[in-house]
């Protein structure tokens, strides 16, 4: 029987984000994407970092874990390796994922672990009341830069491309239909996918709905998401292009480990006998 949208929502824990926060639209779109893919709540695990966006995992009626700051990806990597059968989603903010946790993206990409990472970027550390993040706009006034942000911002898309993340999309809480479609596609993708969402914060106003409205063209129809050089070109454009930037098919971590396991367990060792892993281990006692 088809799972109803309501069944993904936690029966008791309701979102406590500020009214108008961009993260509501992300939560709703993720739950709609799961319903359209018919992922059952008991087949789903959601892991999140710390921040307003880090509350994401609370709101699911599924396996969920609110991890430590910046460590959602390694936690999810362990979980997915132990339970290949689960659909694993990872969620967090620009501070959690691009500052303290930024180093983990490269390694999730190298493994091509089959996870979907949803990054809600509001250009600020919102939960802790407005410190600069790696994507804060130069010159913006924040709690840690009262005279204006004095560092260059990261270009997250270029970073994901250089790590060869196998599915990279940028979208925004303002384009709900497009976000839902990209999330569905990313969850379906076999490998490490990132859906990078520009999600306004109405309280700290570091990224506002107006900022986004004036900047969000979609990638052109003729755009080829398998062309990495073209993807870099669009990642560096001043306008915030939205859509699927890059997609590549390559073996997932699960497939790589399975092929090693098959090779070892099927190994014919000296005497022409096929040996099990425990028999091979016995040889080393
Ligand atoms: C090790 C550690 N350092 C710092 C903090 C404090 N802290 C909590 S959330 C946060 C930033 C969150 O920013 P972001 O990931 O952008 O999430 P947002 O609140 O903007 O959604 C920080 C620095 C912490 N919880 N743990
Ligand atoms: S402070 Fe900003 S990011 Fe946090 S819940 Fe409120 S609007 Fe959302
Ligand atoms: Mg943030």
Image: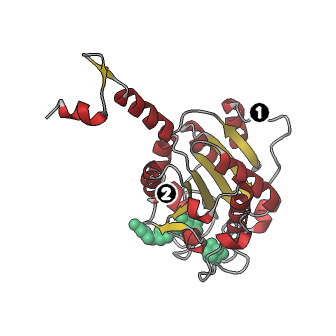
Q: In the image, is 128 to the left or to the right of 39?
A: left
Q: What SS does tag 1 mark?
A: loop
Q: Could you tell which of marks 2 and 1 lies nearer the N-terminus? A: 2
- Marker count (numbered): 2
Question: In the image, what residue occupies the spot 53% across and 51% down?
Answer: 85
Question: In the image, what residue occupies the spot 72% across and 63% down?
Answer: 1
3D distance between C-alphas at marks 2 and 1:
30 Å
Position of 164 relative to 89 (above/below): above
**Residue 241, position as x, y percentages in the image:** 76, 48
In which image quadrant can residue 25 be found?
A: bottom right
Front-lying residue, 271 or 162: 271
Residue furthest to the front in view is 273
Residue underneath mark 2: 99
The mark closer to the camera, 2 or 1, is 1
The answer as to whether callout 1 falls within 8 Å of ligand 3 is: no
Marks 2,1: beta carbons within 8 A: no
Where ligand 2 lies, by image quadrant?
bottom right
Residue 224: give its label.
1
**Residue 115, position as x, y percentages in the image:** 56, 50
Q: How crowded is mark 2: few (under 14 residues within 10 Å), some or many (20 or more)?
A: some
């Amino acid at each position: 029987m088809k799972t109803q949208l309501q069944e993904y929502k936690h029966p008791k824990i309701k979102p406590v984000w500020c009214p108008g926060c961009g993260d509501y639209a992300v939560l709703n779109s993720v739950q709609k994407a799961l319903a359209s893919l018919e992922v059952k709540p008991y087949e789903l695990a959601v892991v999140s970092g710390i921040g307003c966006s880090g509350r994401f995992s609370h709101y699911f009626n599924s396996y969920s874990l609110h991890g430590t700051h910046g460590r959602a990806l390694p936690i999810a990597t362990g979980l997915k390796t132990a339970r290949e059968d689960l659909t694993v989603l990872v969620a967090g903010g620009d501070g959690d994922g691009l500052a303290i946790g930024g180093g983990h993206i490269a390694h999730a990409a190298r493994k091509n672990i089959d996870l979907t990472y949803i990054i809600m970027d509001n250009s600020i550390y919102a939960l802790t009341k407005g410190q600069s993040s790696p994507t804060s706009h130069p010159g913006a006034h924040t709690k840690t830069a009262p005279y204006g942000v004095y560092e260059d911002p990261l270009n997250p898309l270029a970073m994901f491309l250089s790590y060869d993340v196998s599915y990279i999309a940028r979208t925004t809480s303002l384009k709900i239909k497009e976000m839902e479609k990209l999330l569905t596609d990313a969850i379906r993708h076999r490998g490490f996918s990132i859906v990078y969402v520009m999600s306004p914060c109405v309280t700290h106003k570091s990224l506002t709905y107006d900022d986004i409205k004036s900047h969000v063209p979609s990638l052109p129809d003729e755009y080829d998401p398998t062309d990495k050089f073209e993807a870099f070109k669009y990642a560096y454009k001043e306008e915030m292009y939205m859509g699927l930037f890059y997609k590549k098919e390559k073996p997932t971590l699960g497939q790589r480990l399975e092929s090693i396991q098959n090779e070892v367990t099927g190994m014919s060792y000296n005497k022409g006998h096929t040996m099990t892993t425990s028999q091979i281990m016995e040889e080393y006692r």
